[in-house]
């Protein structure tokens, strides 16, 4: 197959998802596609962080009784999300990409509204787990689709715009969840998060689905190989074998593996911090509950917007000087965030922990656009959805599946103030993995 099935770059041939002229259509509607996918990403993260904003109210209502149960709500969603991701990765590399995204958005919206109707802890847990099925379709396929709307030289900025929805959506989750729960109760917050998704699911169906790798300067499908969507549909067993071989091949690619392992440590840190910070501010720093949710939400939205945008711009700019700019920007910014994260969680003075928290969040968000651009850029274009799917599985299995309940369990045994100190450890591990990935990519001559 020319160079390598995972990383190879080859001359472009006609793609199966549309005619040769379709890339121009995709470019024409790229802005609309970016807008729709970004708004859905914002809603995605608003939904994810509604529970964090209403943790005290849910505990007071009696539907949950311990911090461990509160912390376990996040893995309930994430486990289903990460297990469903490989299946959608397979579909995203072989079938229409817009239809499964639309179905996924509709499913998670309905499951979110179900959360507002839950009458027991296990019903609430099941509804949050069901959200993961819908989000797996969107989060796995959307980056691959977006990568085919824009050429490689612009992806750092484009992915920065797309992933700026993470801090903005997370912040809105804290703010909307906090305000709505104060006014109408915690159940109402889930309906505010769920209803808009049904309308956005319809908008996805009108987006173009260009050929995979259509805008690569030297990418496409290997000479003599068959585009997956045009190939004869394999049986279930054969499909599982092909998928397993591809994921194994991706995992054996050192540059990809180091990048994803770093991303897993990052997800451990950010997931644990995001889930517990409002409760940490209320319980450990004696900040009023409304101020804890809305105040932290304001910090996240400002630092996330600025950090994500600047990180994407800086990654594209530094490509002039090094082909591994995205990894260097991500790794060094994360290591610089380490002492600030320690100060934010260890200091009892608001004159120290608030500025340190702002600085740490700003630096951590700088890696969002660049690192996701790396994941879709260091693999063959026809395997992008699978590469994203495997990364989703890994970063959540090793990241925010375990960090919220682990911090909650340690909090039950010691204190929340001590338990959150796991976060800076994960930040350090993340930065070191990304620096190692940059060195590996430089050795292999890979742009990352």
Image (cartoon, grey):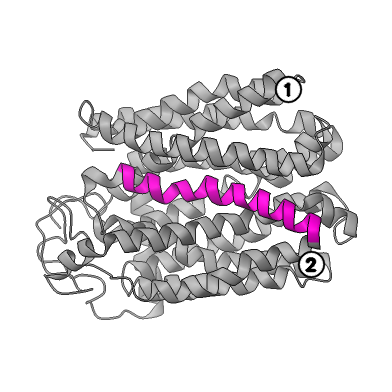
Image vertical order of residue 65 relative to residue 437, above or below: below
- The residue sitting at 26% across, 61% down in the picture is 382
Query: What label does residue 350 carry, if any?
Result: 1
Which range of residues does the magenta coloring cover? 156-183
The answer to whether residue 162 shows anywhere in this view is yes
What is the total number of numbered labels drawn onto the structure image? 2
- The image shows residue 113, relative to residue 419, as above or below, that is below
Image location of residue 402, percent across then percent down = 66, 46
Vertical placement of residue 82 versus 364, above or below: below
For mark 1, does the 10 Å Cα neighbourhood hold few (<14), some (14 to 19), or many (20 or more) residues? Answer: few
- Say whether residue 383 is magenta: no
Badge 1 marks a residue whose secondary structure is helix
179 magenta-colored:
yes
Foreground of the two, 382 or 171: 171
Farthest-out residue, front: 183
Q: Residue at x 44, y 34 (%)?
A: 366
């Amino acid at each position: 197959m020319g160079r390598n099935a995972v990383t190879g770059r080859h001359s472009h041939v006609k793609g199966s998802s549309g005619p040769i002229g379709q890339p121009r259509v995709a470019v024409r509607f790229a802005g609309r596609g970016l807008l729709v996918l970004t708004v859905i990403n914002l809603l995605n993260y608003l939904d994810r962080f509604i529970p964090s904003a209403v943790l005290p109210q849910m505990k007071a209502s009696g539907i949950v009784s311990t911090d461990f149960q509160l912390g376990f709500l996040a893995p309930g969603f994430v486990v289903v999300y990460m297990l469903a991701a490989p299946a959608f990765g397979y579909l995203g590399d072989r079938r229409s990409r817009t239809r499964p995204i639309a179905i996924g958005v509709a499913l998670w919206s309905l499951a979110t509204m179900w959360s507002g109707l839950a009458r027991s802890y296990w019903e609430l847990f099941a509804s949050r787990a069901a959200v993961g099925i819908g989000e797996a379709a969107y989060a796995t396929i959307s980056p691959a689709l977006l990568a085919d709307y824009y050429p490689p030289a612009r992806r750092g900025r484009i992915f920065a715009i797309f992933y700026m929805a993470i801090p903005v959506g997370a912040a809105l989750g804290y703010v909307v969840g906090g305000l709505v729960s104060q006014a109408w109760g915690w159940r109402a917050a889930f309906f505010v998060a769920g209803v808009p998704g049904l309308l956005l699911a319809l908008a996805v169906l009108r987006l173009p689905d260009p050929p995979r790798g259509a805008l690569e300067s030297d990418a496409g499908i290997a000479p003599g190989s068959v585009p997956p969507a045009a190939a004869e549909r394999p049986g279930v067993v054969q499909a599982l074998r092909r998928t397993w071989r591809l994921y194994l091949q991706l995992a054996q690619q050192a540059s990809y593996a180091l990048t994803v392992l770093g991303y897993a440590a990052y997800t451990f840190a950010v997931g644990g911090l995001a889930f517990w910070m409002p409760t940490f501010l209320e319980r450990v720093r004696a900040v009023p509950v409304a101020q804890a949710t809305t105040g932290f939400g304001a910090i996240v939205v400002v630092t996330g917007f600025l950090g994500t945008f600047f990180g994407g711009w800086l990654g594209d700019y530094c490509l002039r000087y090094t082909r591994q700019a995205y990894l260097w920007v991500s790794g060094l910014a994360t290591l610089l965030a380490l002492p600030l994260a320690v100060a934010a969680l260890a200091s009892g003075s608001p004159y120290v922990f608030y500025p340190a928290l702002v600085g740490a969040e700003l630096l951590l968000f700088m890696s969002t656009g660049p690192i996701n651009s790396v994941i879709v850029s260091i693999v063959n274009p026809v395997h992008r959805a699978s590469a994203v799917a495997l990364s989703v599985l890994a970063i959540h299995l090793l990241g925010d599946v375990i960090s919220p309940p682990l911090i909650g369990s340690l909090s039950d045994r010691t204190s929340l103030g001590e338990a959150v100190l796991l976060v800076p450890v994960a930040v350090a591990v993340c930065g070191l993995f990304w620096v190692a990935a940059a060195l590996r990519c430089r050795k292999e001559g890979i742009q990352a």
